[in-house]
Image: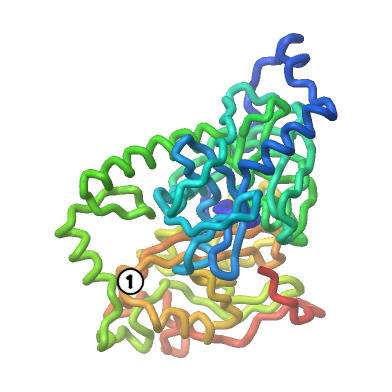
């Protein structure tokens, strides 16, 4: 599970609780969660919820359509890089799947299994009817413990930042959600999916009773887009899952040529590599965090466009509102490859080419918030911006400096 995905890299966060009408007495009686009802819901979830494995990473998901398509989080699918995606059903049957749609803006993915498995889809509820205080159940595979059911309430409705703007009406819950729950369903006492578990706010990496689920209104839109995409594929168009935009066959061939690694690396920029992020950074080692700390984001570079911020920059509003320490984003992985130092970052980037996409896993210096940013890699400029030159005159972007250490810091055990 990604902890507070996207909250690190966007500027605005609207926190007011949405004004919602009070449920009628009839509605309240109809949604009372008895023990028998809870058991029946658990049995339904055991049939229709799944475990997702992508390489050494994984998460949860659920069958969400009559076509047998599975919904999960985008960050679950992306965490494993190019590794095959495997779906394991409640009866233990496992099949490979492909990404039919990837909505990184709302952290959703729609997967199409390679073979049809007869599993009933979970019903999707109307998030507009969700009330603060109602009982909810979270289901998934926290820490690899498949089929785990937890219970809580809807704590609030909030707007959280996403790469393309706020994700409106996110469901906050105190139902226990931990790493591995990502992509699993959050269901009402009626047994309807009202959200997809996507993030937690935590200072330790475990549950502190503050979890977030993307409402099913976005899931319904993703499924509609996936059906349109499937129809386009049936008509012979080549498509890209990441952006959700069809590509004509001749454009697809050209894109493959542009993105394919070259035998000869292009002429490097000023002492950098084939690509750059556009940051000034240094090695960072804190009590719970180890990676590359962003000191400063250079103008007009990939990092600036992706929303990264350095220690010299103003803290994102979500950090200020939560009263957290700010010392710049810390890059801890690129496309699932662990980054512990500037040297690690350079090795990863040296294997990339301009125009390729990269997904950065980010955190804050105290590890309180975790997030993900997607960017398009670029060739370094022929001339570095003035901001990229230290007083000594040497270019420093993406070059190591002295490691920054917190007082009395111990080298932490890397946390996945």
> In terms of depth relative to the viewer, which is nearer, 167 or 143?
143
> In the displayed structure, does residue 69 sit left or right of residue 241?
right
> In the displayed structure, does residue 162 sit left or right of residue 99?
right
State the residue position of label 1.
Answer: 378
What is the image's colouring? rainbow
Q: Is residue 121 above or below residue 105?
A: above
Q: Quadrant of the N terminus?
A: bottom right
Residue 192 in which image quadrant = top right
Q: Position of residue 383 (x, y in %)?
A: 29, 80
Q: Position of residue 165 (x, y in %)?
A: 47, 43
Q: Position of residue 68 (x, y in %)?
A: 48, 42
Residue that appears at 37% across and 84% down: 273
Taking the image as drawn, is residue 118 in sight?
yes
Q: Quadrant of the C terminus?
A: bottom right
> In terms of depth relative to the viewer, which is nearer, 13 or 258?
258
Q: Residues within 10 Å of mark 1 (few under 14, many from 20)?
A: some
Q: Position of residue 306 (x, y in %)?
A: 44, 59
> In terms of depth relative to the viewer, which is nearer, 116 or 150?
116
Residue that appears at 70% across and 49% down: 322
């Amino acid at each position: 599970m990604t902890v507070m995905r996207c909250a690190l890299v966007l500027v605005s966060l609207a926190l007011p609780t949405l004004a919602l009408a009070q449920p009628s007495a009839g509605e309240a009686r109809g949604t009372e969660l008895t023990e028998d009802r809870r058991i029946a819901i658990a049995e339904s979830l055991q049939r229709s919820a799944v475990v997702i494995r992508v390489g050494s990473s994984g998460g949860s998901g659920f069958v969400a359509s009559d076509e047998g398509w599975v919904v999960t989080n985008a960050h679950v699918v992306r965490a494993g890089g190019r590794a095959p995606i495997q779906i394991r059903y409640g009866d233990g049957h496992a099949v490979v799947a492909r990404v039919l749609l990837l909505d990184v803006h709302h952290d959703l993915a729609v997967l199409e299994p390679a073979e049809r498995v007869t599993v009933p889809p979970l019903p999707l509820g109307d998030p507009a009817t969700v009330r603060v205080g109602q009982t909810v159940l979270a289901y998934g595979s926290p820490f690899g413990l498949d089929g785990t059911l937890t219970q809580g309430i809807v704590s609030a409705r909030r707007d959280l930042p996403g790469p393309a703007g706020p994700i409106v009406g996110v469901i906050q819950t105190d139902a226990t959600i931990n790493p591995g729950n990502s992509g699993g369903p959050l269901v009402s006492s009626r047994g309807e999916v009202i959200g997809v578990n996507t993030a937690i706010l935590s200072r330790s990496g475990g549950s502190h009773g503050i979890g977030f689920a993307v409402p099913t209104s976005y899931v319904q839109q993703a499924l509609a887009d996936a059906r349109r995409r499937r129809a386009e594929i049936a008509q012979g168009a080549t498509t890209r899952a990441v952006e959700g935009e069809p590509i004509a066959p001749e454009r697809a061939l050209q894109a493959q040529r542009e993105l394919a690694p070259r035998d000869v690396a292009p002429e490097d920029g000023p002492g950098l590599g084939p690509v750059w992020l556009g940051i000034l950074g240094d090695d960072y080692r804190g009590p719970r965090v180890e990676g590359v700390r962003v000191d400063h984001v250079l103008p007009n570079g990939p990092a600036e466009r992706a929303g990264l911020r350095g220690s010299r920059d103003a803290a994102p509003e979500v950090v200020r509102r939560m009263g957290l320490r700010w010392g710049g984003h810390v890059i801890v992985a690129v496309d699932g490859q662990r980054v512990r130092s500037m040297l690690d970052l350079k090795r990863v980037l040296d294997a990339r080419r301009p125009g390729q996409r990269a997904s950065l896993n980010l955190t804050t210096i105290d590890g309180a918030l975790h997030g993900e940013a997607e960017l398009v890699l670029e060739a370094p400029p022929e001339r570095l911006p003035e901001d990229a030159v230290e007083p000594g005159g040497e270019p420093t972007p993406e070059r190591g400096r002295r490691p920054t250490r917190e007082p009395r810091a111990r080298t932490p055990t890397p946390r996945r």
